[in-house]
Image (cartoon, coloured by chain):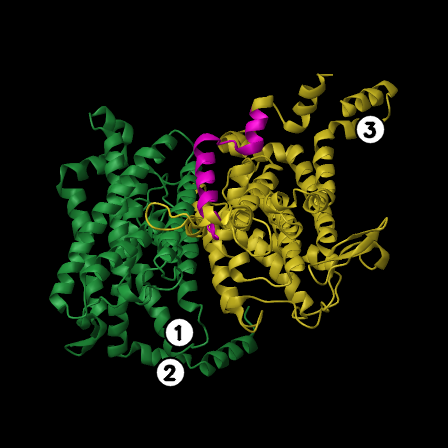
Amino acid sequence: MAISSVTRWVENRRLSWPVDHLRSQQVHLLVVLALLAYPGFYHLLTSSSVSNLAVAILPRMDSMVAVLYFALFAMSFDFISGYTGYLSFGHAAFYGTGAYLVILVANGKIPLLPPGTPFMISLLLAGLLAALVAVVIGLVSFRLTGVYFAMVTLGFAQVMYVFVRGWNYVASNPRDGPAIGSTHPDGFEIGVPFVDQLNLAIGSFSGDEVTLLGHTLGTYTVSFYMVGLVVLLSYFAMQRVIHSPFGRVMIAIRENEERAEAVGYDTFRYKIGAFVMSAFFGGIAGGLFAGFKRSVTPESTFYFLTTGDALLASIIGGFGTLAGPLYGHLFDYGVREFLSNRGLGGGLLPYLQETLSQAVLTTTLPGGITVEGFIQAALNGHASLYVGIVFVLFVLYVPGGLLGTLRIGLGGKVSERLPAKLWGDR
Amino acid sequence: MTDPTVLTELTALALQAGFVDGLTDFLGPSNLASVVVEGLAKSAIYVMIASGLTLIFGLMGVLNFAHGSLTMIGAYLAGVVMVVLVGNATGQWTRMAFFFGALVVVFIALAFLGGVMEIGLIRELYTRPPIYQILLTFGLTLVLEETVRIVVQFYGLQPISEWQGALGTKPAFMATEHSLGPLSVRGLAAFEILLGLATVAAIWAFLTRTRYGLYIRAGSEDAEMAEALGIDVRRVFTVVFALGAGIAGVAGALLMWDPVWGASVPLAAETLLPAFVVVIIGGLGTFRGTVAGALVVGMADATTTWWFQNVFITWTWLPEMAVFLILVGMLVVKPQGLYGVEEVGGH
């Protein structure tokens, strides 16, 4: 129990508030450390003797970047849907707004903003524009509740989806979506704007590589850390709101809106406020997505199934737990990658084809197909089936999701109860 | 305070796009009549894809996200029946007979699937908040769609493009135009209108003229009271879910023949969203409202399609956007829909 002895040492020294604060954040610290260590861990395992297995099971580094920015979107969805109980089924509108704005700025299509605008500024603008869209949508939608609220937000998002699909100002072929053009050949830099030394670019080809203590961190690893930094900051910002009196009112609205109103809260304002904040972070997530991928499609941004993915992540991770969607999406994405055949290495299909002997692969099963044919038919890119089954099982039997169930088991918030369980209450 | 220059500019823009010419054209009797017929055909399709949804919501309060997937399965199933039975030499009336046979097969198969879904999965969730039913049926969509995709790919078909083989089983008179007095009507449009009318009449008769229909109306109004009066509400729930699934399948069978839709895996999402719009515009859970909603959406769709095809040729998004704008507009003006009751669908 190394950590336990450290904390005991810390307590005995009775150090000041920063240490107290850190101690209350032990679980957060552990998660962040684990994520920090992941690239090294991945590199070690995939170049070791179990590399075949490791490549098959572990999510690739570029996937981990995608997990991070989409997890932020799922968190922003959970922030409004899980905490106030208003299912924001058109949340993809904010993700799309952020993503499209970043690309349009880089392509010089937004008046007053040159293509060279620092990414941190266009990211902020992406969040602000999404928030502005949320004000408009929210003012209409929050007059309704329940299913109607979900449907009217869905309606707004679909209107935007259809619109960007047909608007040839955003791209020469709007149905395929816009991509970064020649006006912005460099990678998008995350860091302190206008200070070159404090920036690192993200992206698979245009990103920066960093040499640290003789090791070269590839573009994916650098992107992972830089995107992770933004996601972490956004997470803590949302967590602060949830823990503030404002957040208590959000939960009160979920539990019993009439009572919250009777107590004297103007719930309409609180709902709009929460919606706007969640849209802001949804826009940031979309901006990160566009910055990393450098091209987006209407389907991957404004379409209602994008919201569906956030919903999957939230339910599997834990509805109404802010960090849950991260684990939920990691799980979702991990399963998808494990069961799909993308040809980039990794996944169950190439692993089985490599490790099973030829005799097993050519055996004929009842029904006349070979084992290899069966594996192909059942596994090749059909991860949605298995994710769907897992999702249905979660809805039926684990309604709290991963984190929510852990929370129930520990009898309180994981970040508070886990340390207490591990090394006793203090 | 309107700036006159803006107005002039707007008028100029409208003139440039041929708006006035278009309007005169549009209001011409033959154009208007053909738009109305097309609108009726579209309304018939919309009422068929939406009525199952509204029956289920009206009684059980379950917003069935898997509804579109059931329609998609119905389309494929009907396609299988038709492709197996119909050869090149099959005559037109035999094809029609086979189609009605396929309708029966699809209805029974989908009703069975719906019954199994209700008993096995959805029944578990009646005591939970309504959001969980949305979640569960959303998960079912993923499972159903991917399963169909696997099967379809296994037989060497492209899951994302329409199944041409099934489209080809259409009788010849449906693919051509027929003159009905001064009107020229597509054969398929006429068939769609007739089948839509028949479906609406059948559901209407079932709800108002049969004992089970009475149970359903009673259950929709007050499930607790109905139970107290000795109705086995649990069984009524199962029957209604099966019925809704069956109607979804029948709608799919019709769409299989329509080149605008066709049997394909994305058909699930393509029908689900307009079905939601229709049901919500009409007022969640009222069958009368759904019929009215389908008429509104169908007419709007046909009108905007005409404008897009004849005047604003570059506005590809016009018809699709109109449907969702109607939804948003309706919810802003009258959230409970045309015939909706205030409390339904709230918290």
- A155 vs B55, left or right, is right
Count residues near mark 2 (Cα–Cα under 10 Å), then give few for <14, some for 14-19, many for 20+. Answer: few
Magenta-drawn stretch contains A391 = yes
- The chain drawn in yellow is A
Q: Which residues are magenta?
A: A379-408
Q: Residue at x 47, y 83 (%)?
A: B16
- A43 vs B119, left or right, is right
Tell me which amino acid carries mark 3.
Answer: Val
Q: List x then y, in percent, for residue B48.
A: 26, 54
Dot 1 corresponds to which residue?
Answer: B308
Colour given to chain B in the rendered image:
green
Tell me which amino acid carries mark 2.
Answer: Asp
- Mark 2 or mark 1, which is nearer the start of the sequence? 2
Dot 3 corresponds to which residue?
Answer: A19
**For the residues carrying marks 2 and 3, which lies nearer the camera in this image?**
3
Count residues near mark 3 (Cα–Cα under 10 Å), then give few for <14, some for 14-19, many for 20+. Answer: some
Label 1 and label 2: CA atoms lie apart by 14 Å
